[in-house]
Image (cartoon, grey):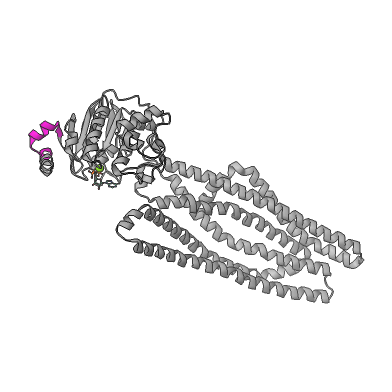
Amino acid sequence: MKAKHIIKRLSAYLAPYRIRFIEALLCMVVVAAVKSGRVYLLKPGLDKLIESKNVNLIVIFSAALIVLTLIHAVVTYIQNYLLAYIGQRVIIDVRNETYSHMQNLSLDYYLKRTTGALLSRLTNDMMYVQNAITTVPVKVIRDGLSCVGLLIVLFALNWKWTLASLIFFPLVMFPIKFFARKMRKTSRQTQEKMAGIYALLAEKLSGIKVTKAFAREKREMKKMEESNWDYFNVIMRLLRAETLQRPILEIITYTISVVIAAYVINSIFRETVSVGTAVAYLAALINFYAPIKNLADLNKDLQSSLSASERIFRVLDAEITVKEKPDAKNFTGLKDKISFENVSFSYSGEKDDVMAVKNITAQIRKGTTFALVGPSGGGKTTIVNLIPRFFDPTEGRITIDGVDLRDFKLDCLRRSVGIVSQDIMLFRDSIRNNIAYGADKATDEDLVRAAKMANAYDFIMDMPCGFDTVIGERGATLSGGQAQRICIARAVIMDPPILIFDEATSSLDTESEMQIQKALDAIQAGRTTIVIAHRLSTVRRADNIAVISSGEIVETGRHDELLAKNGHYSRLYNIQFKIQ
Ligand SMILES: Nc1ncnc2c1ncn2[C@@H]1O[C@H](COP(=O)(O)OP(=O)(O)OP(=O)(O)O)[C@@H](O)[C@H]1O
Ligand SMILES: [Mg+2]
């Protein structure tokens, strides 16, 4: 993205606060004017004072200077307050917009990115943008205006001196340009390194159990240390440039000022100028360099906020791949069947890439149980993920009662599909809120009914606070089987017409598995259910079984039909039977 586009886009966020922003701009104009005026006043003031030798005039003159300084202070305060306000408000807007876009982004986006990188967009990068909004306008406008104002004063006081001293100007501009180039590069790098640290932190802290299990704490510490040192090396390059720039500019500007001052004082001796003019001129000169030094920092602020904004905009521009059509229909429930029509899917979305699922054609009739079995990595989870449109087929289509899934309203469709997925995802919240996650209007009776259906009621009641017991992130304070039963309760509380169980019984003991199986039988009654199971005992009663291997359906039929075929299914079944 070009800097111009980024700035244009950023300023669009300022639009809602334009009145406040204009007020801040006015304050900046006042500050610059007061600064220049205060200096210019010195000339007539001092000349008159010296001429009249009037003590009263000294008081009036001093009071005028103090009043101007007070105005300067108050207006600066208002300006800074307004800018801080605008900066924080804009950040709320940008952060809300980014987060809401993240919520809407399809799952494929998250498969390619780390949580840490996204976290750093919402925190670290936002900080840079906010900093830019509060500091860049001040530097450009207020300090720019101050420079211009003071230059006018300098010309007005003595244009010959000013013109002559302009030959020193390149001496000031040279280091500014030199350091700007240096800082531009490094400020971008520091942010990227910091984003890397965020990514590492988020990943490793969420995987702390694995680290501990393999006693890899030392190695993880080392990795973090390396990242920290990497960051240190880059930021020190930036800070070296930053800290060196000021003193170098100080030396140059001070030397120039001294040379000019010597000349000016000499002029007083020769009585070619008045004392007032000389003092005012020197004061203006000293004041002139302060905003120039501020302007020198501008480049760094600008660059770091440009690259941070660019990263945020890249998130905002990320395409939502699973889209809802503008004229999408309501999903009013399954009437006849779900059909897979020659469905193929690749995780990259490219047609010529490896297909995780190939040419699936199948029908699931209303009220029946459809089972998917087969070797691990065959593509079972991938197939069921297409039904609530976590992903769209790369080729072919899935229809419900003849209507393409892509023609339904997304939330409507997803609410009609209850899913118990293979990986347990629970939030750090009460059991009640976890079960009722998708059902805002759930009553206590619904909750108890769902818990009983999932065979979870008894263990919930045994917990210290029952339904109000707070469980850990991802169900960390529950056993695997308990967590899974909470997930089942969460799926059934919505009473969805279509239910998907992906290995829903895999981490249960034989006893609870049987109970769950009973519950499932009850839940399945009158519902369309898709079950994935490794243990073939759980799919024996399914109306239709598809054996999936390498992304394809290799066999279909009922349990006894498949056994009679003596193919893949009977082979799988015999292996399991022998083990038991
Ligand atoms: N996010 C992903 N990106 C790329 N490939 C993936 C992704 N998820 C799964 N795959 C691949 O897709 C194929 C099918 O995976 P899938 O999870 O559907 O298998 P599965 O039949 O559910 O296996 P299991 O019985 O072990 O759960 C596998 O080869 C896997 O490597
Ligand atoms: Mg799976």
- In this view, the residue in front, 575 or 164, is 575
Residue 166 percent across, percent down from the top left: 68, 68
Indicate whether residue 297 is drawn in magenta. no
In this rendering, would 290 be left or right of 448?
Answer: right
Report whether residue 326 is seen: yes
Front-most of 327 and 263?
A: 327
Quarter holding the C terminus is: top left
Along the line of sight, the residue nearer the viewer: 115 or 308: 115
Q: Position of residue 350 (x, y in %)?
A: 29, 45
The stretch in magenta equals 556-570
Which quadrant of the picture is home to ligand 1? top left
Q: Number of numbered discs present?
A: 0
Q: Is residue 170 visible?
A: no
Magenta residues: mostly which secondary structure? helix
Tell me where residue 453 appears, x and y as whole percent.
30, 30
Residue at left offset 49%, top offset 42%: 97
Q: In the figure, 53 relative to 338: above or below? A: below
The quarter of the picture where residue 272 lies is bottom right
List x then y, in percent, for residue 184: 51, 62
On screen, residue 351 versus residue 288, left or right, reads: left
Q: Which quadrant of the figure has residue 163?
A: bottom right
Q: What residue do we see at 72% from left, 58% from top?
A: 149
